[in-house]
Amino acid sequence: MKHITLDITNVLSKTIGDEGIDRALLLNIAAKIKEFKKTVYNTPYPFMDFGLLRSHLNDVYKVGENLKGLNIKNLILLGIGGSSLGTETIFHALLDPLHNIESDKRGNAPRYFILDNIDLHRIKRVAELVKKENEETLLVAISKSGETPETMSQFMVFKDILTHGKDYKKRIVIITDKNKGMLREIVKKEGYLSLPVPEGIGGRFSVLTPVGMFPAWFMGIDVEEILSGAKGMSEHIENADYKKNLAVIIASILYAMDNKGKPIHVVMPYCERLNAFADWFRQLEAESLGKKGRGPTPLKSIGVTDQHSQLQLYIDGPKDKFITFLYCVNESQYIPESIPYIEELDYLAGKDMKELFRAEFLGTRRSLTDAKTPNITITLDEINPFNIGALIFLYEMVIAFMGFLYGINAFDQPAVELGKIYTKAIMGKKGLEEKRQVIEQELTKKRSIIEF
Ligand code: PA5
């Protein structure tokens, strides 16, 4: 079996009629990308520059040299959006589900806590733990801008706790822009270990830079293999004919589906280890393409769990959805004949649970196809660092190609910035007094409220 296989049968009009896309139309869109692809590979975006990514892997190893000899039991990772979702994807796919709970599941690696929110319910508990195990904790703060209030406030809290421990400066690593931002200023002033987020690579495209590679390396994950997988995928995208090109065809389908009145893109992993990948992709698609009144709306659904939650809507609700299944072959678990007196359970007894899992996937896909809900399936032969790198890079390219099709800049996020400015204004940041007034006025106005 190949590493990654794409099945587009159920999106074609020859399978599902008018709700699908005609192959000729699909190839028309793909042909447009074909030309753009040449331009892109002549002048690659920084996230496609494997020389650069490779050299930053060496930087990761150099920082690692400085951490030798420390007895780290807890990795605390601070970051939000593109600064944490890539790491979450890699950890969720490649570490054991009981990693934090059972020491034999994590080998020499520490426990990890990715703090991508400032809701205190979690932060305060982790802070208590760090107070107890201060000298066994490594703090990694990641922010491209080095200014994000969530990450900065977390850093201020956790740095303050660490200062109570011996040699605390050796146990802080900062990953941020090489030259700009407050975090860089802090590195210079306080002398922490640091790694760069390369110029021209925004948060959601940064997982293959030190942003995702340092935490992955620190947990003992084979980052060389992740990069090899990404590079292998890049070579496929560069060289494969556009009709057989994974990124070109997926981008064309996603674009065609949105244009066909199916703007809701459901990503449904039938593969527990890819659940966090769906979160990463949700951000990549939403923040990159949601511009100028257009862009698909990504949703995450979990197979098989959401068969019992969302599937009714996907089959019998509005015909505005398109599904991407992510499938991987499951582990084996024999279902014992432990309840012999109930004959109706015979169809399960003595079978392998992975066969049930597969049957549920096939059954769901079939029922969606019968209802003419277009869907594609991406199958991974195995969940390993190589395939994860390949899958990440594949979707980064899909989104870059879609940006071209929509005629928008996929690499900025202007609409998110205003909310950040209001937040800082409310908190009293100098220079934002006018914005603060807007909010204060809003709060004095009579509001429409219903109470219990
Ligand atoms: O993709 C993006 O650019 C964003 O999601 C950012 O990653 C997020 O806003 C965090 O920004 P920063 O890394 O500057 O703290």
Image (tube, rainbow, N blue to C red):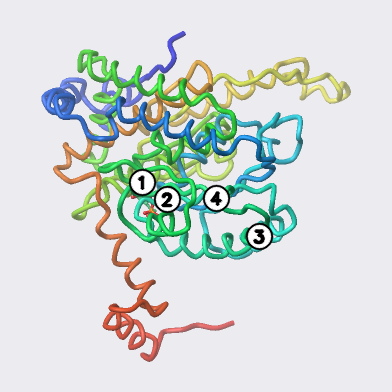
176 to 119, vertically: above or below: above
Q: Which residue is mark 4?
A: 172
The numbered disc on residue 203 is 1
The numbered disc on residue 59 is none
Earlier residue among tags 4 and 1: 4
Q: Secondary structure at mark 1?
A: helix
Decide if residue 157 is on the left or right side of residue 252.
Answer: right
Q: Amino acid at mark 4?
A: Ile
Quote the CA–CA distance across marks 4 and 1: 21 Å
Query: 61 or 310: which is nearer to us?
Result: 61
Earlier residue among tags 3 and 1: 3
Query: 420 or 375: which is nearer to us?
Result: 420
Proximity of marks 3 and 1: CB atoms separated by less than 8 Å = no
Q: Residue at x 69, y 31 (%)?
A: 108
Q: Which residue is mark 3?
A: 127
- Foreground label between 1 and 2: 1
